[in-house]
Image: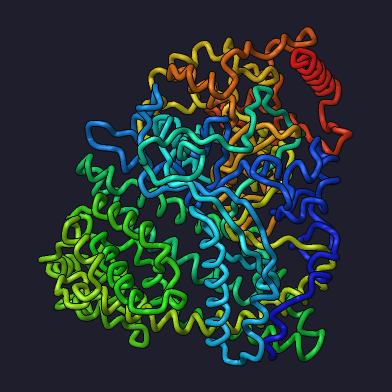
């Protein structure tokens, strides 16, 4: 198949109408889609019907600057999360779990900011966020033709992949050379049918301002993670600093001052009600909406179960170590949190895919595609062959790709060896993450790894990795691990590693780690600057890493050729699927700026239990047990006694709101995404999805696609409890007096009027209503706000809400 199939015309991609359903029904899903800035014109009318009051160019204008280019420019990238400027002095809001690494880096046993939270009472008390930076998008350029020209006449798969990578690197280098403090990347869209160059301004001086205690920011822990109802205050505040002339500057540079952004989101005190419009702005990481059936089957039956099993084992190791030593608990906190989140995500995807029966849908779709002719069948056969090959090499590939969770000493060694190897290559040919532009980031990551190092944890993790490696089949052996297994080799049966006793591997791991000095910062610095010293080193972890890096390079060569093949097959498949589905498309998430428009909405769980879309402080208190994951801080418990009298109450709930649901289209990377109301004001912080939507990465569904958002009013209430009046002042909400009095008699006990409130109280703050207790959720459709169920009472509540809004508009005027 010719490489010319790489590029689809812009007419094909953007001449279609908006909205793609993944069910194959041909009916566009209401709020499905993560929309690129350039596609906003296509969705703006639908969003306005739901309550958006802004035009597309008020959200994003290509020709605009930081100051007049639209409020989406206030949303920034934060190390795999999203965030937003929310004050004129560079205050940035994101999730608590997105600031977790910075909290861990500053924590000690004496000052455990993860557990106790952090509040800077003055600017001088703000703490550095080492190794973290904020990237603000400035410009988007279509470079599809440049990439297409780079592969003209290239028939070899590996060569095609190399040509694409080289072209991307050249574009990035030219972009970053044009100005200081620029970070550029070339991103592929629509399965490689379109390429864009995204130019960011990078701010490296980022400081911690506020984070609630873990008992707020992580309330409910892994029990509530990916679940509803939620009562988590998953928010934190940081600040960007810049030079005296308001330009990006090195972290900690003398004279740096708070940055004055051209755009920031104005915090709102009005909050939301069921049926209200919300917009989610941010950088969603990765979705898999266009997987062919063979690849979806591999995910569901092979890859996800493997991730669930192995991550569970590594989590148990870190938990056990942390229980023995508070200092170790801090060191492993971020890694354990990452593993736990990904493990539960894998389990949720397995359950969700089974519930949706999505594989059968995709298989039926692919059969229809095959019937379109020889070219279509050849495309699907080629894709199926790639999935088969991935399955066959899967066990060893999974282990090698997850070395980032290996002992810190081995991770350090792997990075050192890879860095040393790549320094001998032309910069354009180097591995991503190991180019000259990456040097400072790489060093910062190594420095943090030394801080996280614990000798005992290293032994336990290495023993686990050894046991997994020993359980690989003969055609999957790892020479690197085999060399250090010693007498433990052969203790595990192929495919049954978890059943083998751990002691032989623990003994082998202890011996393998003897004499390693990579956790010593001085030793590390010497090796980092001297590739020859790395090559000569006899440190046992570097010796092991050299072998494993060789195995990784061999694997990456196979994967590179695969990418080259997909550069032809994937766009061809995308073209076929687009025509079959008959609907316009959005691109899979790829960590670029997107907008999802949604409405505040509850849902029914798989068991039929109806869930209302808001939770409140009373529900958090009802969950409080005084220990473990449900142990609210004493000041919060005390303040909760008078929460119903707080100025931050929701007049409909009669209590301080905590979280709410929307039917937005989100995924990993949307953590920390600012959530705006119809006027473009900040009302919350996206942080999770419900259990029934964990598999939403593969398909969006009207019935169960719900994202979980921390209500901004819960942040304001917590800031008040913490005595952070200066931050309320900075946010412009310090003088807020509370919502207007209710417009109608009989609405005083709004918590009781909230659908499902009685059920919530009886179920320990569950926030749900059983299908047999007669309460129905409010459902709002379009502008008409049609209400199902108890129409008379619901209408009174709606009228009260409208009166309150009218009063607020009068007050504002």
* Residue 299, horizontal then vertical, whole percent: 55, 69
Q: Residue at x 69, y 90 (%)?
A: 2
Q: Residue furthest right?
A: 784
The answer to whether one can see residue 80 in this image is yes
Q: Is residue 303 above or below residue 757?
A: below
Quarter of the N terminus within the rendering: bottom right
Colour pattern of the rendering: rainbow
Residue 599: quadrant of the picture: top right
Residue 413: quadrant of the picture: bottom left
Q: Is residue 497 above or below residue 803?
A: below
* Residue 164, horizontal then vertical, whole percent: 58, 78
* Residue 628, horizontal then vertical, whole percent: 36, 34
Q: Residue furthest front?
A: 245
* Residue placed most toward the observer, 64 or 333: 64
Q: Is residue 59 above or below residue 298?
A: above
Q: Residue at x 66, y 40 (%)?
A: 67
Answer left or right for 648 relative to 793. Answer: left
Q: Residue at x 33, y 87 (%)?
A: 474
């Amino acid at each position: 198949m010719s490489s010319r199939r790489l590029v689809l015309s812009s007419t094909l991609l953007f001449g279609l109408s908006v909205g793609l359903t993944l069910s194959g029904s041909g009916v566009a899903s209401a709020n499905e889609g993560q929309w690129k800035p350039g596609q906003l014109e296509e969705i703006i009318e639908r969003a306005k019907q739901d309550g958006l009051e802004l035009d597309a160019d008020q959200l994003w204008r290509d020709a605009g600057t930081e100051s007049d280019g639209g409020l989406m420019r206030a949303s920034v990238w934060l190390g795999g999360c999203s965030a937003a400027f929310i004050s004129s002095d560079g205050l940035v809001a994101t999730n608590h779990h997105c600031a977790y690494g910075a909290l861990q880096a500053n924590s000690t046993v004496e000052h455990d900011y993860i557990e106790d939270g952090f509040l800077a009472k003055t600017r001088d008390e703000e703490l550095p966020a080492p190794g973290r930076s904020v990237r603000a998008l400035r410009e988007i350029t279509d470079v599809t033709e440049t990439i297409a020209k780079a592969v003209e006449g290239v028939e070899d798969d590996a060569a095609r992949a190399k040509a694409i990578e080289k072209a991307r690197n050249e574009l990035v280098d030219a972009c970053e050379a044009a100005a200081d403090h620029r970070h550029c990347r070339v991103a592929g869209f629509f399965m490689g049918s379109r390429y864009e160059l995204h130019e960011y301004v990078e701010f490296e001086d980022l400081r911690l301002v506020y984070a609630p205690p873990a008992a707020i920011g992580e309330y409910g822990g892994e029990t509530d993670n990916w679940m509803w109802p939620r009562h988590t205050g998953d928010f934190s505040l940081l600040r960007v600093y810049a030079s005296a002339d308001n330009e990006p500057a090195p972290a900690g540079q003398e004279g740096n001052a708070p940055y004055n952004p051209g755009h920031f989101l104005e915090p709102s005190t009005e909050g939301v009600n069921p049926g209200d419009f919300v917009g989610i702005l941010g950088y969603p990481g990765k979705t898999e909406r266009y997987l062919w059936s063979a690849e979806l089957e591999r995910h569901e039956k092979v890859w996800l179960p493997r991730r669930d099993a192995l991550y569970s084992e590594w989590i148990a190791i870190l938990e056990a170590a942390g229980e023995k030593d508070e200092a170790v608990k801090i060191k492993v906190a971020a890694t354990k949190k990452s593993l736990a989140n990904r493990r539960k995500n894998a389990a949720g995807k397995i359950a969700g895919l089974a519930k949706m029966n999505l594989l059968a849908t995709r298989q039926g779709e692919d059969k229809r595609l095959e019937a379109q002719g020889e070219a279509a069948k050849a495309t699907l056969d080629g894709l199926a062959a790639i999935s088969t090959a991935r399955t066959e090499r899967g066990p060893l590939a999974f282990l090698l790709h997850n070395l980032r969770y290996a002992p810190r000493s081995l991770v350090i060694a792997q990075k050192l060896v890879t860095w040393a190897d790549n320094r001998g290559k032309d910069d354009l040919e180097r591995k991503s993450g190991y180019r000259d532009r990456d040097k400072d980031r790489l060093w910062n990551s190594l420095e943090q790894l030394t801080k996280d190092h614990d000798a005992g944890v290293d032994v336990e993790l290495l023993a686990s990795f050894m046991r997994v490696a020993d359980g690989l089949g003969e055609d999957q052996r790892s020479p690197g691990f085999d060399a250090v297994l010693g007498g433990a080799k052969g203790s595990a049966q192929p495919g049954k590693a978890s059943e083998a006793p751990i002691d032989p591997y623990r003994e082998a791991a202890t011996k393998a780690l003897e004499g390693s000095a990579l956790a010593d910062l001085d030793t590390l610095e010497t090796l980092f600057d001297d590739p020859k010293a790395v090559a000569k080193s006899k440190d046992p972890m570097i010796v092991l890493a050299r072998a494993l890096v060789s195995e990784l390079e061999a694997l990456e060569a196979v994967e590179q050729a695969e990418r080259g093949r997909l550069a032809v097959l994937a766009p061809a498949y995308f073209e076929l699927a687009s025509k079959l589905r008959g609907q316009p498309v959005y691109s899979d998430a790829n960590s670029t700026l997107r907008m999802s428009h949604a409405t505040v909405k509850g849902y029914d769980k798989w068991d039929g239990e109806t869930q209302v879309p808001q939770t409140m402080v009373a529900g958090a208190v009802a969950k409080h047990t005084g220990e473990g994951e449900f142990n609210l801080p004493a000041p919060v418990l005390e303040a909760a006694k008078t929460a119903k009298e707080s100025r931050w109450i929701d007049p409909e709930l009669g209590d301080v709101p905590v979280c709410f649901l929307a039917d937005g289209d989100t995924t990993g990377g949307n953590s920390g995404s600012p959530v705006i109301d119809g006027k473009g004001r900040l009302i919350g912080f996206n942080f999770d999805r419900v259990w029934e939507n964990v598999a939403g990465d593969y398909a969006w569904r009207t019935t169960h696609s719900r994202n979980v958002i921390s209500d901004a009013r819960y942040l304001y209430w917590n800031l008040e409890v913490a005595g952070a009046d200066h931050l309320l002042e900075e946010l412009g909400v310090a003088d807020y007096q509370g919502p207007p009095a209710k417009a109608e008699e009989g609405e005083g006990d709004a918590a009781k009027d909230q659908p499902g409130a009685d059920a919530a109280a009886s179920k320990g703050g569950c926030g749900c209503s059983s299908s047999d207790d007669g309460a129905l959720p409010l459902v709002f459709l379009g502008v008409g706000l049609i209400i199902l169920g108890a129409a008379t009472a619901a209408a009174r509540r709606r009228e009260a809400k409208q009166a309150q809004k009218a009063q607020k508009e009068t007050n504002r005027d």
